[in-house]
Image: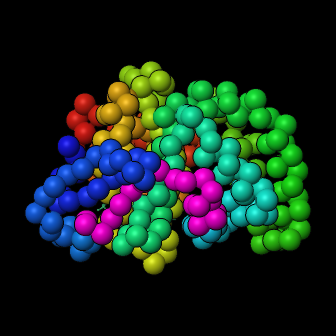
Amino acid sequence: MLLAKGQCLLYNDGVQPIAEKSGSGMSNNKNKIDLNSIKIRRTYINDDINIIIDISRACFPGSLKWNALKYSAKKRWQYILTSQYVEVYIVLLNDIVAGFFILATDIPSYNKEKEKEKLQYLFLRMLSIVTLILKPYLIMPSLKKLHKIIFYKRPSMISDRITDHKTTQDKIAWAELTGIGIQYRGKGLLTIMHEFMVARCLELGKEAIGSLIDPNNLLVARSRKSLHFVKTGESRYGHTYIKYLSHPQ
Ligand SMILES: CC(C)(COP(=O)(O)OP(=O)(O)OC[C@H]1O[C@@H](n2cnc3c(N)ncnc32)[C@H](O)[C@@H]1OP(=O)(O)O)[C@@H](O)C(=O)NCCC(=O)NCCS
């Protein structure tokens, strides 16, 4: 099992551990975090949705999508949490929710699923106008994003996820949105989540983990590189990084 730094119970559904590693019970030296105090479990749609909304708002303060009206934010999260192609996990530190992460296990099917909900998404987009009226500080970041999506027209930049085609899409899982509450950052939780994702992806028979990163998010880009991700392309949606699981360490 890959979770080699002490003991960490990882819960899939809140009842059954899906990965368990007994160890010395030592702390993770680098970040001084006691791994016994961490649990990772699947999200409960009714219980966790509000805390996920709060964390995602705090993590992405300039994002129109995540700072939308509560109704819209709830709807979006409901689509994500009920998708069979996406797994959302909660990270608990001493039984308190410290963060969450999304692992998209089948992006092509997820996109098809979203296509079916086109009208609902359109409705949510229209509601964004109300958000912008109520939260005008979101106007500038939203315009910048829109500008990038509309005007970056080089063919290589159109596709959102640029892989190097060594692995087919069905064999790649994507580490999507990740958010850690401000007071829990810098303790190594991103790295622990990553170890969890690798274990889960191997369990699902995936060959690689991909990640689409905002080029301005230097911390995440650096962390991906140190976790042996390689950059495979740049698009108007961000930089794509891939990690091949044949060498998971
Ligand atoms: C990005 C984020 C998830 C990182 O989570 P975290 O638990 O604080 O990260 P970790 O403690 O595991 O640290 C990851 C790396 O960043 C480094 N790091 C963490 N905090 C840092 C800080 N304040 N300054 C510099 N480096 C820092 C760590 O040393 C580690 O580097 P390494 O992999 O080279 O050892 C968290 O900051 C966050 O939620 N940010 C806002 C949302 C976001 O940007 N999400 C990611 C894109 S979806």
Which residue sits at x=45%, y=35%? 173
In the image, residue 110 sits, relative to residue 195, either above or below, namely above
Which residue sits at x=51%, y=61%? 179
On the image, the x and y values in percent for residue 123 come to 86, 46
Q: Is residue 13 left or right of residue 153?
A: left
On the image, the x and y values in percent for residue 201 come to 36, 36
Q: Is residue 170 left or right of residue 152?
A: left
Which residue sits at x=76%, y=29%? 116
User: Is the stretch drawn in magenta largely helix, strand or loop?
Assistant: helix
Q: Which residues are magenta?
A: 35-53
Q: Is residue 107 left or right of residue 66?
A: left
On the image, the x and y values in percent for residue 231 come to 41, 41
Residue 41 sits inside the magenta stretch: yes
Q: Is residue 142 at all visible to an observer of this figure?
A: no
Q: Residue furthest bottom?
A: 183
Nearest the viewer among 102 and 15 is 15
On the image, the x and y values in percent for residue 192 come to 32, 57
Q: Is residue 32 at all visible to an observer of this figure?
A: yes
In the image, residue 151 sits, relative to residue 67, either above or below, namely above
Nearest the viewer among 101 and 248 is 101
Q: Residue furthest front?
A: 15
Nearest the viewer among 152 and 12 is 12
- Tell me the quadrant of the picture where the C terminus can be found: top left
Q: Is residue 210 left or right of residue 33?
A: right
Total labels: the figure holds: 0
- Quadrant of the picture in which ligand 1 is shown: bottom left
Quadrant of the rendered structure where residue 46 is? bottom right
- Tell me the quadrant of the picture where the N terminus can be found: top left
In the image, residue 194 sits, relative to residue 29, either above or below, namely above
Which residue sits at x=79%, y=59%? 71
